[in-house]
Image (cartoon, helix red, strand yellow):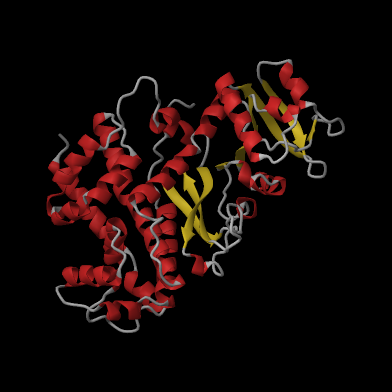
Amino acid sequence: MLSIKNSDKLAIQLKEKLHQLPLNQLASRHGFMKRDPQKISPIYFLIALFITILTGANSLSSFATTIGLMGGFTLSKQAVAKRITYPLVKFLEALLAHSLSFTIYNKSEPIYQNLASKFNRILLHDSTSIQLDSKLAKHFPGSKNQNHKPIAVLKIQAIFDLLTETFCKFNLSPFSRNDQKASTDIIDIVNPGDLVIRDLGYFVLENFRKIHDKNAYFISRLKYGTAIFKAGGKMRLNLLNELSSNNKIDINVLLGVNEKLSVRLVAIPVSQQVASMRRRKARRANRCNPSKEHLALLGWSIFITTVPPSVLSVEEIVKLYKCRWRIETIFKSWKSHFNIKDVPNASVIRVMTFIYANLVFITLFQTYVFLQFYKQILRENGKQLSLLKITRFFNNQIWAIILYAQQFHRIQEQIFYHCKYESRCQRTNHTQMVMDLG
């Protein structure tokens, strides 16, 4: 069993981090707090938001009750409603930015030393969408439904560092701002030595060049229809012919008629089962039948990258790209256990309050709860902790956690027993997959 002393330190550290946040300064700067609070302090407000998020109790009455229980006073829902205004949204937005910057500039040692020796950061960029009440369609326009009625959809763009398992940036936008438009979001934060991994939705040659110009690397699947030229830049490459005569390829090419972006193109064949599944999806997704060439290329995993062969082999590129699914697992944990999809049917101010508070909680939880437990159990027992299981644990046991906060070793003991990855011979978990690289 892990020591009580270590778990007590963890509990104290988590509380200290919450109190270290400049809540009063940020609240005052953005107009949420205009004088010293007599009842509703920013920290009470923030913790109450976290609890309502985890419990799914999004009514104003529940929120007022939670604050009252913490502060030892009674509070009306009308008093709470008066505080949920635009300055609160700006306060939470600033708090999120501060939490992210604090994480970035005070980051701990990378978890995966095998890849940390090759890259400064491995940035996963992806998005998730949340449907809102249709009355908010003018604020968050989405695509129209089959009845041609407007739909409100909010999109969260997230950038996540795989090496330290921490978030770097969030961006909220309407669904109408697609991933291709959002592909520029990463340019401002990418640094020399970083590796960017994104899916086809972010495929923009101009932005790949910008990443390269900042002395960073990228890995992406190749978008069908992109013009490919041989290294000289004059002759087009017939990719299907090239693949047909090789078991795998690893060549330097130029992409784009005008851009002529220099990249490394790698490809390996997929199983017949995977190829058949891809072709079924392609036929369903296209109104007209996909070409024979397109269907044939779906029998291959084809990637473009600027990572040299001396750093990553073809097989390692394929494996590392699969780690992009880490951010999909994170989105699943948000929606399944942190209730981020259960947005209150209310005004745009309340919706933005809910989303920003949720993202602040997610950032703090990822850094100061999940990572602390993750590193400790890995160091002491050599076991790996499941993100989905630990988020489910906190969602289901939030009141027990609050009641037994002073005896945090009880919580830790339950987490280490119930939230580990199960041993499976035929399935590799995320940690094993990353550690097998390099």
Figure disc tally: 0
Is 245 positioned to the left or the right of 160 in the image?
right
Q: Quadrant of residue 329?
A: top left
Asked if 432 appears above or below 343 in the picture, the reply is: above
| Coordinates of residue 92 in the picture (x, y in percent) | 40, 68
Is 394 positioned to the left or the right of 304 in the image?
left
Residue plotted at (23% across, 58% down): 15
| Coordinates of residue 44 in the picture (x, y in percent) | 25, 69
Asked if 375 appears above or below 357 in the picture, the reply is: above
Q: Residue furthest right?
A: 234
| Coordinates of residue 378 in the picture (x, y in percent) | 29, 33
Judge whether residue 271 can be spotted in this image. no
Image quarter hosting the N terminus: top left
Residue plotted at (48% across, 35% down): 323
Asked if 100 appears above or below 112 in the picture, the reply is: below
Is 103 positioned to the left or the right of 11 in the image?
right
Query: Relative to the observer, which residue lies in front, 164 or 137?
Result: 137
Q: Quadrant of residue 373?
A: top left
Q: Residue furthest front?
A: 147
Judge whether residue 252 can be spotted in this image. yes
Residue plotted at (22% across, 70% down): 67
| Coordinates of residue 17 in the picture (x, y in percent) | 29, 58
Is 421 positioned to the left or the right of 355 in the image?
left
Query: Relative to the observer, which residue lies in front, 263 or 49?
Result: 49
Residue plotted at (33% across, 44% down): 371
